[in-house]
Image: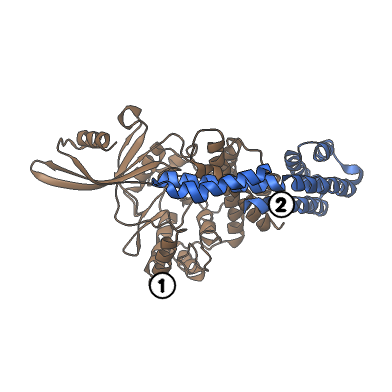
Amino acid sequence: MDARIRSYLAKQFGADDLRLSAVERIAVGWSHETWLFDATWTTEGAAHTQGLCLRRDPGNALLREMSDLRLQFRVLSCLDATVIPTPRPYFFEDDADILGSPFLVMEKVPGTCPSPWGRDGRAFYQAAADRGVLPDSFTDTLVQLHTLDWRAAGLEFLGVPDAGDDFARREIAKWRALIDASAHDVDPVLVDLLCWLDANAPATERLALVHGAYRTGNLLIDNDRVSAVLDWETQVIGDPMYDVAYVLSDLNREGTDLLSNLVERDAFVRRYEAGTGIQIDLDVCRYYQLLYGMRSAAFWMSASGLYATGRNRDLRLARTEWSIPVVLDRAARDLGY
Amino acid sequence: MTPDELLEQIAGTLRHQIGPEVAEPFAKTQAFMASVVLEKLSRQLRLADAHALADGVDNTTLVHDVRVLLGSDASVPMRGALDAVEHHDAGRALGRLVESLYAERDTLGVERFDALLGRVRQTLRRRLDRQMEYAS
């Protein structure tokens, strides 16, 4: 694989002497395959080194139905000229003859992305919370996202909801499609949740670029600041409260009172409202938290369905079959069961 | 040895004897996950008969209570859903019953809708509690 990547990049950069070093494969299994490496070459006597990240579509990744690498490349291309910290995209190839399946090459941004659920990651974010710089950067980056002129950035291709409750209905329909494609029977609690969401869809007061999974673990951190927003797979033009609801939820707190195990709630609310001029609507957030519950169920149904239908033989996916009742239990409590 | 005991024993073998001998990280994770899956299956299998019995009792009581709450107002879809809960695949039928209630929300009025949905949710809550015995 390294030789094929090297050969491809040598052609792209017009440098026969291109070499790869510090090659590291990450994110094995569930999502797109990812390699990090440094490319070094000379042009007209001058040496160049560029850190790069290559993501390849294994053909059976989670959420593949919702976001492919071509879409990610397009979103990153639109965001490259904006204030949103994102990796600069360089190449997208859908020719499977090159590396076996479609892939994109983008900048390797300095920073780390500790898993928020592991012991080391928990310690990392708790220490950063104590220092107090990263919590503000976390909030400020969300402010940047939600105040971005997404039309000027060329992101209308993501789809622009109509006024009223169109955004919520689009999201319900999108994730319902994942449920229907999962080869699972729909649990009656999930039926209740879907019906409740349909019956209570809120009107959207303003539209913003919504990341769709804004949390630690999807953010690259460098020197206590967010150096890149990652995982552009669930982004949408929609209600900014959708992201805020996710940040405010009990998810990802790792047993602490801190949002994403990082940000004090009141400080987040104050800074977000001051930065965006948007007043957080807790009733709407409660709705979207239930929508995230439906999303979680859809996600796990899709994951276990990948294993059950033989499209992916990773046993971690089989294990997610029992995550479905767990997320439905949370949703049932939120519904008032 | 019962089937659930056999599964549990295999899970233990994977976790304590096979897994530790596997050096490659991905394969080691797979061995561990296989043991987790078999443990879950074992527990689910062990509880299956008791859960089926409890589900049956709950569903029968639910159908009776919903029929009382509806009186003579049960629509054709609602009657069909109740019959299905009583006699057929209860999981899907409970979903149909919930859908029928939401579809007839305006006809039922807020109070009756809330009372009926609240009653269905009691049954769904107990059903979910049973699932959590092996899922969590």
As drawn, B47 above or below A255: above
- Name the chain under label 2: B
User: Residue at 58% across / 54% down in the picture?
Assistant: A288
In the image shown, does A19 or A47 lie closer to the viewer?
A19
Q: In this view, does B117 lie to the left or right of A182?
A: right
Q: Going by the picture, which residue comes out furthest to the left?
A: A45
* Colour in which chain A is drawn: brown
Q: Is residue B132 left or right of residue A301?
A: right
Question: Residue A202, can we see it?
Answer: no
Which quadrant, please, contains the N terminus of chain B?
top right
User: Residue at 61% across / 44% down in the picture?
Assistant: B7
In the image shown, does B51 or A13 lie closer to the viewer?
B51
Q: Going by the picture, which residue comes out furthest to the front?
A: B1
In the rendered image, which residue does mark 1 sit on?
A130
Rendered blue, the chain in question is B
As drawn, A215 above or below B68: below
In the rendered image, which residue does mark 2 sit on?
B130
Q: In terms of image quadrants, where is residue A28?
A: top left
As drawn, A274 above or below B60: below
